[in-house]
Amino acid sequence: MARPVIVVGAGVMGLSSAVRLLEAGLDVRVITRDLPLQTTSVVAGAIWHPYAVQPMERAMHWGAVALQQFYRLLDVPEAGVSLIPLREVYEHPVERHWATDYLRRADAIPANDLPSGMASGFVLEMPVVQMPIYLPWLVAQVERLGGKLEQRTLTALDEVASPEVLVINCSGLGSRDIAGDASLFPIRGQVAKVAAPTVREGYLSEWGDHKVTYIFPRPDGVILGGVSQRGNENLAVSEADAAEIQQRCAAINPALRDAPVISVSVGLRPGRPAVRLEREQRADGSTIIHNYGHGGAGVTLSWGCADEVAQLAVQN
Ligand SMILES: Cc1cc2nc3c(=O)[nH]c(=O)nc-3n(C[C@H](O)[C@H](O)[C@H](O)COP(=O)(O)OP(=O)(O)OC[C@H]3O[C@@H](n4cnc5c(N)ncnc54)[C@H](O)[C@@H]3O)c2cc1C
């Protein structure tokens, strides 16, 4: 009989992996320090975009799998996934958008319709996920399939690893401590959610040094971003970042200038030179499948990684 499974982490990676493991017929318990609405995952914007993640070939494979699942979830209103028109613009000429073969729509913007200073751009039909709705929906799927969630902080994976259980490590940046992974680094992000019901079209500029401008209209408010501060671990809201972000977004869409702020959130993206998704067979007979280090793309890759975790688990 298959060993019972302990998933460490209840962010988007832990919960998506738990769903796929349960669907594969395994006995699953999720252990997490933070409840889902306190994780980095809940801060995400969250669009389908493989930002700050490597290796790109594997990321695009995982992302393509996840994209199809997000399309299917459009038919499940409780999941909180929707499609928005989004303009992605570049300061240099780009003939073909990188996601042309993936997204349902990626049309070039005529030159006379580009914001000033931009050389090219595309109108995309982009999935956007309301994480404060989506994560509880994932928890409900875990529980419906018979999985359990337990709030507990581990100091090391050794506390739960043994030959009798299979451990799935989805602890994000927490793997610095519990897996001793010194290659992980935080990439601080900050977003605001504002009330601006007339703003229906999203916007995304090119990622520059430490900053990017984005506007993601969601049913629960319009998400404004952002910053990308490598090595910064400060989880406190920066008023300076908040003012600068709203100013940048208002320059794109003036309706955002005085939009009332609903909330401001900070999260630390789990940066790593490459995602770690692999099985570790340990000398004591225990097995750990690691699934962490997804940078700014955890939502984008979630279902593809979860499928691979489940495949590794059933081969185990
Ligand atoms: C501002 C911002 C915007 C973003 N926008 C997007 C976007 O548009 N699209 C996109 O795809 N991605 C986006 N991201 C990135 C995305 O949020 C992350 O890649 C993703 O959340 C990582 O998920 P995770 O489950 O691996 O980690 P987390 O959500 O951090 O979850 C880790 C889990 O491990 C648990 N854990 C950690 N340590 C321990 C321990 N010692 N013991 C027990 N449990 C532990 C935590 O409690 C938590 O439950 C954004 C991130 C930020 C900050």
Image (tube, helix red, strand yellow):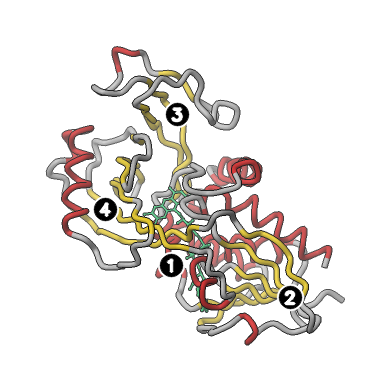
Dot 1 lies on which element? loop
Image location (x, y in percent) of residue 49: 49, 42
Q: Is mark 1 within 8 Å of ligand 1?
A: yes
Question: Residue tagged by mark 2?
Answer: 166
Identity, as a three-letter code, of the amino acid under mark 4: Ala
Instruction: Give the Cα separation between the discs numbered 3 and 2.
Output: 41 Å
Question: Residue tagged by mark 3?
Answer: 124
Dot 2 lies on which element? strand
Instruction: Give the Cα separation between the discs numbered 2 and 4.
Output: 39 Å
- Nearest to N terminus: mark 1 or mark 2: 1
Identity, as a three-letter code, of the amino acid under mark 3: Leu
Q: Badge 3, how many Cα within 10 Å: few under 14, some, many 20+?
A: many
As drawn, the residue found furthest toward the left would be: 258
Image location (x, y in percent) of residue 84: 41, 35
* Residue at the (72%, 62%) spot, across then down: 23
- Nearest to N terminus: mark 3 or mark 4: 3
As drawn, the residue found furthest toward the bottom would be: 159
Judging depth in this view, the residue of 134 and 301 nearest the camera is: 301
Q: Is residue 149 left or right of residue 231?
A: right
Where 130 sits versus 285, above or below? Answer: above
Instruction: Give the Cα separation between the discs numbered 3 and 1.
Output: 28 Å
- Nearest to N terminus: mark 3 or mark 2: 3
Question: Residue tagged by mark 1?
Answer: 39
- Nearest to N terminus: mark 2 or mark 4: 2
Question: Residue tagged by mark 4?
Answer: 192
Quadrant, the C terminus: bottom right
